[in-house]
Image: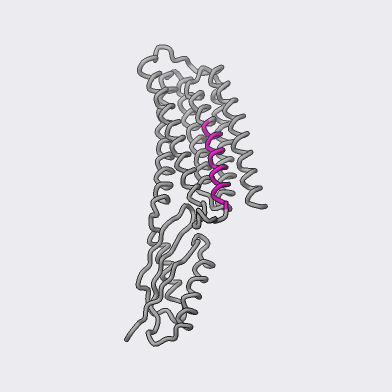
Amino acid sequence: MSNDSIVKRLSNVGIFGNIVLAGFKLIAGILGNSGAMISDSVHSLSDVFATLIATVGVRISQKAEDKNHPYGHERFECISSLMLGLILAGTGLGIGYTGINELFFHQEEIKIPTFLPLIAAIVSIIVKEGMFWYTMYYARKLNSDAFKADAWHHRSDAISSVGSFIGIGLAKLGFPFMDPVASLLICILILKVAFDIIKDSLNKMLDTSCDDEFEQSIREYVLSKPGVIRIDVLRTRQFSNRVYVDLEIAVKGDMSLINAHAIAEDVHHGLEHEFSDIKHVMIHVNPYLD
């Protein structure tokens, strides 16, 4: 299956699945007297926009390098992920505001929910968890941060439905205030996921270095190459979902330029082939003198 087919499939599943689910949960929330379920439906509706942004971001990021963008367009993935995180954070704050408003200012108006919102919560948990695994599976195939963030949107919706189920269930047992309390719990869970997505996207936009484990694996690979005596400099930077490497290696000082260049080429091509996340290696050769 081509990347374009995967993107189209993820887009269709995310958009149409969330529209149907959001409509179902909104009707269940209104007819079933559940503010938590109405908040949950708003969360599902926000996932529609999340999927649209992810789709546009991935399609732009896959464009080839050109004269004005010699390093490619992958950073659009970061922009998409950042927008998804901000949308998710806004949704969470909106849900939290609704919960606080009902709990502290309109508690006397809170009605005991019916069984319909409970059924909607169960359906939402099953469907959204399935959408999470489906989207994450193909996001990993694409190595797409935007669709990974979209998958976490689905997971956060499933978690919020768990909170809705608990709150609605307790409300039916005689604790009606637990319905808006569930909205507050949903708000906290959504904000946590949003924070993680925003943090990751900002790190990759700021050329943050890779973790120690990844750099150590690069060191071990380079030093295993024939002719490499030591590594003088190793710097990595994340460029969206790809990695750039700046490397200085030392070879025998009396070696011919042709042989030193061959060693550098072997390291360069080997790294780009062995590590799929590495987009480009800039390598410099230093003489090693005994």
**Picture quadrant of residue 52:** top right
Q: Is residue 131 magenta?
A: no
Q: Which residues are magenta?
A: 46-63
How many marks do you count on the picture? Answer: 0
Q: How is the image coloured?
A: one colour
User: Residue placed at 56% from the left, 32% from the top?
Assistant: 124
Image position, residue 39 (x, y; %): 48, 25
Q: Is residue 222 above or below residue 42?
A: below
Q: Pick the residue in front: 176 or 27.
A: 27
242 versus 181 height, above or below: below
Image-based side of 103 in relation to 87, left or right: left
Q: Is residue 139 left or right of residue 75?
A: right
Estimate the x, y position of residue 23 in percent, counting from the top left.
Answer: 59, 25
Q: Is residue 99 found left or right of 277 in the rendered image?
A: left
Q: Is residue 218 above or below residue 191?
A: below
Q: For this rendering, which residue is in front, 162 or 284?
A: 284
Residue 100, horizontal then vertical, whole percent: 38, 22
| In this picture, residue 124 sits left or right of residue 87 | right
Q: Is residue 52 magenta?
A: yes
Q: Which residue sits at x=48%, y=16%?
A: 112
Residue under the point 40% across and 61% down: 236
Quarter of the image where the C terminus is located: bottom left
Q: Position of residue 24 (x, y in %)?
A: 60, 25
Task: Farthest residue to the top: give it.
Answer: 108
- Per the picture, the main secondary structure of the magenta-coloured stretch is helix
- Front residue of 132/201: it is 201
Outermost residue to the left:
290
